[in-house]
Every structure is written in structure tokens, then in C-alpha cells.
Image (spheres, rainbow, N blue to C red):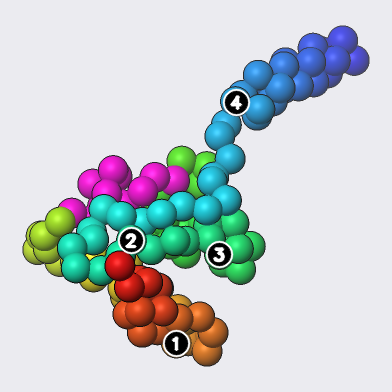
Amino acid sequence: MRKLVILLAAVLTVALAFGPGMAAPPDKIVIQEIQKSKAPVAFDHKAHGAKAKSCQACHHKDAAGKEQKCSSAACHGAKADGKKVDLKEAYHTQCRDCHKKEKKGPTKCDECHPKK
């Protein structure tokens, strides 16, 4: 019994020490890494996160709880590299294809990129 109490205390200590320290994802972000001629995209991360089955639906390379932006995770760069598509194509394919599949959300340029 004493070992069980010690084990539970250790688990609780670890959970309290690390749980609150994990940063929650931002509610809204602005995607501006790839803008050239179009305005940056205002993205409601919280709303999309609630609709996605898991974080890996978009953050396909990252472990749960360790998601990063594609540009900082060396996932997609400014230019295509072998089979890796560039960041612009990755965003456009991911977003547009999901919106078309769900028959909801913007699919045209100016619907995501407001005119400057």
C-alpha cells in the first residue's frame, strides 16, 4: 500500500510540474511566412483544432503535444525539395483540399487572402 501511495504521489507531482507548463496553442494566428503578392492569412487555429480529428491531421510530422509550424520544423521550406512540396503548396493543398472535401470554407484566393 505504501508503494502505491508513493507511486501516485510521484505521478501527481510530475503531472502538476509539467502539465501547466505546456503551452496551449494560440487561438488565432496570422500565416505570413509565404506572402508575396497576397495579404497574410488570418487563421482561426482554435476553430480548426476543434474540427480536426487530431493535431496530426495538419501537423503530420510532429508527435502529439510537440507540434510546430511547418516553417520552423524543417517540414516544408520556401522551395520544393525532392518529394517535399514547398510551404505555399503545402498550405494550399492542405487547406483547399479539406475545404473542398468538407464542402465548407474558402477555396478561392481572395477568400483567405484579403486584398491589400
Q: Nearer the viewer, residue 115 or 48?
A: 115
The mark that comes first in sequence, 3 or 2, is: 2
Q: Residue at x 65, y 29 (%)?
A: 19
Amino acid type at mark 4 = Gly
- Of helix, strand and loop, which one carries label 1? helix
- Identify the residue under disc 1: 100
Segment colored magenta? 67-77
Mark 2 and 1 residues: CB-CB less than 8 Å, in contact? Answer: no
Which amino acid, by three-letter code, is at mark 3?
His
Residue 5 coordinates in the image, percent (x, y): 85, 15
Quarter of the rendering containing residue 24: top right
Q: In front of the other: label 2 or label 4?
A: 2
Q: CA distance from mark 4 to mark 3?
A: 23 Å
Contact flag, marks 2 and 4 (Cβ < 8 Å): no
Labels 4 and 3: the sequence-earlier one: 4
Is residue 25 positioned above or below 91 on the image? Answer: above
Residue for badge 3:
48
Q: Which residue is mark 2?
A: 40
Observer-nearest residue: 41 or 98? 41
Helix, strand or loop status at disc 3: helix
Q: Which SS class for mark 4?
A: loop
Q: Residues within 10 Å of mark 4 (few under 14, many from 20)?
A: few
Q: Nearer the viewer, residue 23 or 36?
A: 36
User: Would you say residue 69 sits in the magenta stretch?
Assistant: yes
